């Protein structure tokens, strides 16, 4: 299980470099808010570790998502992550296929992450269980669950261990990687180790509980020690 930590700036990234994957986002713009391309590029220059970049919580804008994904890949991101903040399987398929083509057409070595939300019923968005087969069919690499509304409620408040285990097992059968995120806390690490997704994504946990605060390197180390 790898630890992905999401800094919002070049300065914060320096405090997150112990993580397995450095994920560039702009929390003020949403759960998967996109940061500037020059920030992605600069953070990529800080480390040899994989760098991920969120491109946004997208409504049904497949052209916009494809263009943003291409830009993030060109800026240096190794993982390009998009959230599906709308409903409908055929719409989701079109957007996912566009993002995959935009990235893999010129950067075949890079990874595409498709995210949907644990709180999909209150957002009226596509279910993670409906999204994952579409992501696999389109050639994406990672299916991710996050929370769309950041009000402190954890992914575990929407999906219990049994359903998260089902998601991980389904993705293994589909041949894609699983990432879990969504206001995770230190007390969630032990149950996560039982579920054993490939990647867990955190921000608030390593900011002392408030995702609007700065990342604290000692909390990144604490999370890594608990995982390992």
Image (tube, rainbow, N blue to C red):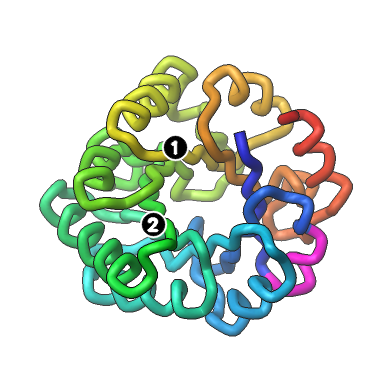
Q: Secondary structure at mark 1?
A: strand
Up-down relation of residue 68 to residue 212 (above or below): below
Mark 1 Cα shell of 10 Å, populated few (<14), some (14-19), many (≥20): many
> In the drawing, does residue 2 fall left or right of residue 135?
right
* Magenta stretch contains residue 81: no
Viewer-closest of 125 and 1: 1
**Quadrant containing the N terminus in the rendered view:** top right
Residue at horizontal 76 percent and vertical 57 percent from the top: 16
Quadrant in the rendering for residue 11 = bottom right
**Residue 48 % position (x, y):** 69, 63
**Residue 45 % position (x, y):** 69, 75
Quadrant in the rendering for residue 15 = bottom right
Up-down relation of residue 12 to residue 222 (above or below): below
Is tag 2's residue or tag 1's residue first in the polypeptide sequence?
A: 2
Up-down relation of residue 25 to residue 137 (above or below): below
Q: Which residue is mark 1?
A: 178
Marks 2/1: CA–CA distance: 12 Å
- Residue occupying the far bottom of the picture: 38
Viewer-closest of 183 and 181: 181
The segment highlighted magenta reads 9-15
Mark 2 Cα shell of 10 Å, populated few (<14), some (14-19), many (≥20): many
Residue at horizontal 77 percent and vertical 29 percent from the top: 226
Residue at horizontal 59 percent and vertical 25 percent from the top: 192
**Residue 206 % position (x, y):** 76, 47
Q: Which residue is mark 2?
A: 112
Residue at horizontal 17 percent and vertical 53 percent from the top: 93
């Amino acid at each position: 299980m790898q630890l992905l930590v999401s800094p919002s700036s070049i300065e914060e990234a320096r405090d997150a470099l112990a993580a397995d994957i450095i994920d560039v986002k702009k929390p003020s713009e949403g759960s998967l808010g996109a940061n500037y391309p020059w920030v992605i590029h600069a953070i990529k220059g800080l480390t040899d570790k994989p760098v991920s970049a969120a491109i946004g919580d997208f409504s049904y804008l497949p052209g916009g998502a494809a263009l943003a994904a291409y830009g993030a890949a060109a800026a240096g991101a190794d993982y390009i992550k998009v959230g599906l903040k709308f409903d409908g399987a055929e719409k989701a398929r079109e957007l996912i296929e566009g993002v995959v083509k935009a990235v893999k057409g010129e950067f075949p070595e890079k990874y595409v992450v498709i995210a949907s939300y644990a709180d999909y019923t209150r957002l009226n968005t596509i279910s993670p269980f409906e999204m994952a087969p579409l992501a696999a069919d389109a050639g994406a690499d990672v299916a991710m669950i996050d929370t769309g509304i950041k009000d402190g409620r954890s992914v575990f408040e929407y999906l219990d261990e049994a359903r998260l285990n089902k998601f991980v097992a389904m993705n293994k059968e589909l041949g894609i990687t699983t990432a879990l995120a969504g206001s995770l806390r230190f007390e969630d690490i032990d149950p996560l180790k039982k579920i054993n997704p490939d990647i867990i994504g955190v921000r608030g946990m390593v900011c002392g509980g408030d995702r609007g605060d700065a990342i604290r390197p000692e909390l990144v180390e604490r999370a890594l020690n608990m995982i390992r």
